[in-house]
Amino acid sequence: MAENRFKARQQQRAAAEQERLEQAMGTVLVPTAKQETELLQWHVDKDLKGKFKAYCAVNGLKMKEVMTELVTGYLKDNGAL
């Protein structure tokens, strides 16, 4: 049981280190202050959602962060930000 806790802590540390590296490289949006969030929902094709979810899981990404990055990029590209 102690070995499982050790592995879990080791994985958490590795994930935190990876996030710090991504933030340092500028590949992850870093919130400057605690931002208020709201729920955003829409319907999407079931297969598309499955592929998106699998891609995020395989690449160790959080769907929320990817969607935030996508929406932000879209708004910037279209002059809304």
Image: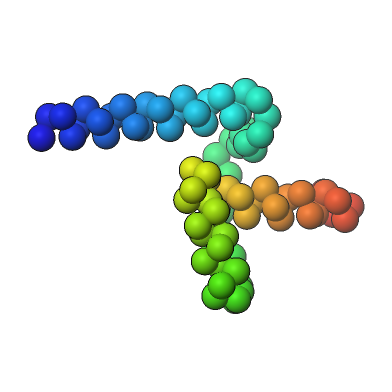
- Most foreground residue, 4 or 72: 4
Circle count: 0
User: Is 15 left, or right, of 62 in this rendering?
Assistant: left
User: Is 17 left, or right, of 79 in this rendering?
Assistant: left
- Most foreground residue, 37 or 20: 20
Task: Give x and y (percent) for residue 64.
Answer: 55, 53
Identity of the residue drawn at 56% across and 72% down: 47
Q: Can you name the residue that lies furthest to the right here?
A: 79
The answer to whether residue 3 is above or below residue 44 is: above
Q: Which quadrant is home to the N terminus?
A: top left
Quarter of the view holding residue 6:
top left
Identity of the residue drawn at 52% across and 44% down: 59
Task: Give x and y (percent) for residue 39.
Answer: 54, 63
The answer to whether residue 49 is above or below residue 8 is: below
- Most foreground residue, 32 or 25: 25
Task: Give x and y (percent) for residue 79.
Answer: 89, 52
Identity of the residue drawn at 34% across and 32% down: 11
Q: Can you name the residue that lies furthest to the left here?
A: 1
Quarter of the view holding residue 30:
top right
User: Is 4 left, or right, of 29 in this rendering?
Assistant: left
